[in-house]
Image: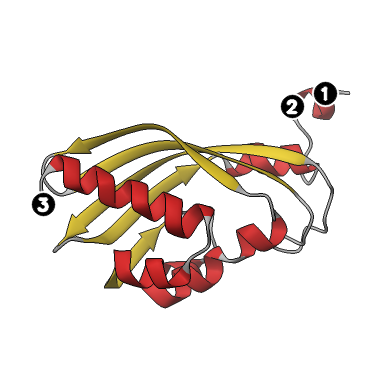
Amino acid sequence: MCATENIALVRRFFDEFVNRGDVAAADELLAADYIHHDPALPSGMQTSRADYVQGFRMFPTAFPDLHTTIDDIFAGGDDKVVVRWTTRGTHLGSLMGIPPTGRQVAMTAIHILRIAEGRLAEGWVSFDALGMLQQLGAIPAPSQAAD
């Protein structure tokens, strides 16, 4: 696939799966042996496509109005796409043991996706988990810790 097709594939993944929660689209867009790498997520989400898709559901459950915006996107070579994204949502459900706070949060990330045979084969994410936890009040922000 060319760079333009790879970017279109990644945009479709964010639109259909991340923003709409379409699991059938995830099954179509992610390779059967998809592997996800993200040190901020439970290790169980990083072992298979099914585990990643099932684990991802915790986010729209915790943030029913979850929406991700692609801030920057570019293709690197013919098999990788890099995305800088921002996700916003209101914390109305439990998230990894954190009870709902009603707070609105914005989480930013850099996501690298490897494409093979027209599907997303592997993903590496680095997102601001600390910032998210501070916005939820689960961890004090630096200004709060100094008080």
Q: Position of residue 119 (x, y in %)?
A: 23, 62
Q: Is residue 50 visible?
A: yes
Helix or strand or loop: what does disc 3 sit on?
loop
Instruction: Residue under label 3, please give it.
Output: 1
Marks 2 and 1 sit apart, C-alpha to C-alpha, by: 6 Å
- Judge from the rendering whether residue 97 lies leftward or rightward of residue 15; answer left or right: right
Instruction: Residue under label 1, please give it.
Output: 146
Instruction: Residue under label 2, please give it.
Output: 142
Color encoding of the figure: secondary structure
Farthest residue in the right direction? Answer: 147
Marks 2 and 3 sit apart, C-alpha to C-alpha, by: 45 Å
Marks 1 and 3 sit apart, C-alpha to C-alpha, by: 52 Å
Q: Residue at x 69, y 56 (%)?
A: 64
Q: Position of residue 135 (x, y in %)?
A: 74, 37
- Tell me: residue 47, above or below residue 59: below
Q: Residues within 10 Å of mark 1 (few under 14, many from 20)?
A: few
- Tell me: residue 102, above or below residue 49: above
Helix or strand or loop: what does disc 2 sit on?
helix
